[in-house]
Amino acid sequence: MALGLFEHPHLTAVRTELAPGDVLVAYTDGVTEARRADPTQGLALFGDEKLRELVANAVGLDASEIAARIESAAVEFSGGQLHDDIAVVVVRNLPTT
């Protein structure tokens, strides 16, 4: 929900635990809605599935590397022509050694 859009938004606090090695990724819709023209399908969006695959293949990377990889992939997908701003915040619970 966009903060400041509604005077009295209904927000719910949720508590969760990140196990060692878990990653939490927060992002704006500018990431998943990064788009490009596709000659066979028309307009193609980066989408949730591509983002899931990207994060799933980031095993072993630290939080800043994951965030940079997401940003870079969205920009590359759109041919460098983003139509919306993007923000990515990644929190990683470091594995115990």
Image (tube, helix red, strand yellow):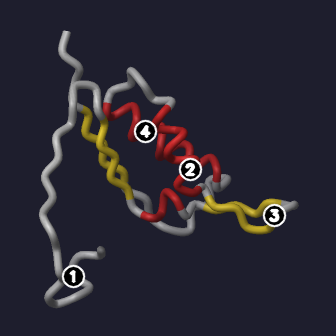
Give the position of the C terminus as an image quadrant. top left
Q: Position of residue 76 (x, y in %)?
A: 62, 46
Query: What numbered label is drawn on residue 68?
Result: 4
Q: Nearer the viewer, residue 23 or 36?
A: 23
Q: Amino acid at mark 4?
A: Ala
Answer few, some or many: residues within 10 Å of disc 1's Cα (few below 14, many 20 plus, some between 14 and 19).
few
Question: Hey, what amino acid is under mark 2?
Answer: Glu
Label 1 and label 3: CA atoms lie apart by 36 Å
Question: Going 56% across and 44% down the picture, which residue do you hit?
Answer: 73
Instruction: State the image quarter where residue 85 is shown.
Output: bottom left
Query: Which callout, 3 or 2, points at the residue further toward the start of the chain?
Result: 3
Mark 2 highlights which residue? 49
Q: Secondary structure at mark 2?
A: helix
Residue reaching furthest to the bottom: 7
Give how far apart the Cα atoms at labels 1 and 4 are.
Answer: 28 Å
User: How far, Cα to Cα, is label 3 from label 2?
Assistant: 17 Å
Task: Give left or right: position of 6 versus 47.
Answer: left
Decide which of tag 1 and tag 4 comes sooner along the chain.
1
Residue holding disc 1: 4
From the viewer's perspective, is the residue at label 3 or at label 2 nearer? 2
Amino acid at the residue labelled 1: Gly
- Disc on the earlier residue, 1 or 2: 1
